[in-house]
Image (cartoon, rainbow, N blue to C red):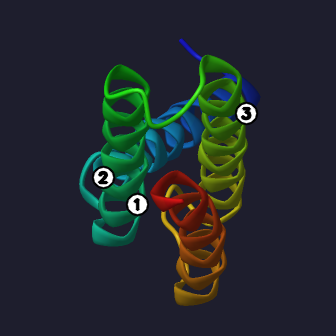
Amino acid sequence: MLSRKTFIGSLIVATVGTLAIGSTAQAGQWEASHPRRVEVNNRLANQNNRIHRAVQDGQMSRGEARNLHRDDRQIRQEERDMASQDYSHLTRADQRALNQQENQVSRRIAQ
């Protein structure tokens, strides 16, 4: 027969485990489908394609493309960092800041 301490300890472990699984599932759901993250990441993918086309068309050197790709990687990492602080989603302020950074890179692609 289990002692009372063992029973309570087992109950606590089971409860904490259930909470951890539930919060992980919820974080995965946000990560996969949160509209602000999707919008930011779609813009980054679009810019990546524009950079590749500009290099292929001879409108941009490989060095310029490398610098723009580096800037895009930094924006993507900042997006991940921001999302990790807010349960895998972006706030409106986060999205606004990332969009401003993407706009700067986009202008440099169009030159």
Whether residue 65 appears in this view of the structure is yes
Relative placement, left or right, of 14 versus 53 is right
Relative placement, left or right, of 62 versus 28 is right
Whether residue 4 appears in this view of the structure is no
- The amino acid type, in three-letter code, at marker 2 is Asn
Q: In x, y percent, where is residue 48?
A: 41, 37
Q: Badges 3 and 2: C-beta atoms under 8 Å apart?
A: no
Q: Which mark is residue 67?
A: 3
Residue occupying the point 59% across, 44% down = 76
Q: Quadrant of residue 50?
A: top left
Q: Badge 1 is on which residue?
A: 37
Q: In x, y percent, where is residue 8?
A: 65, 37
Q: In x, y percent, where is residue 99?
A: 54, 74
Earlier residue among tags 1 and 3 = 1
Task: In this rendered view, identify the residue nearer to me: 26 or 37.
Answer: 37
Mark 2 burial class by Cα count in 10 Å: few <14, some 14-19, many 20+: few
- Tell me the element at label 1: helix
Relative placement, left or right, of 72 versus 58 is right
Q: In x, y percent, where is residue 23?
A: 47, 49
Please name which of the two marks, 1 or 3, marks the residue nearer to the observer: 3
Spot the residue most to the front: 58
- The amino acid type, in three-letter code, at marker 3 is Asn
Residue occupying the point 62% across, 78% down = 100
User: In which quadrant will I find the C terminus?
Assistant: bottom right
Earlier residue among tags 3 and 2 = 2
Q: Badge 2 is on which residue?
A: 42
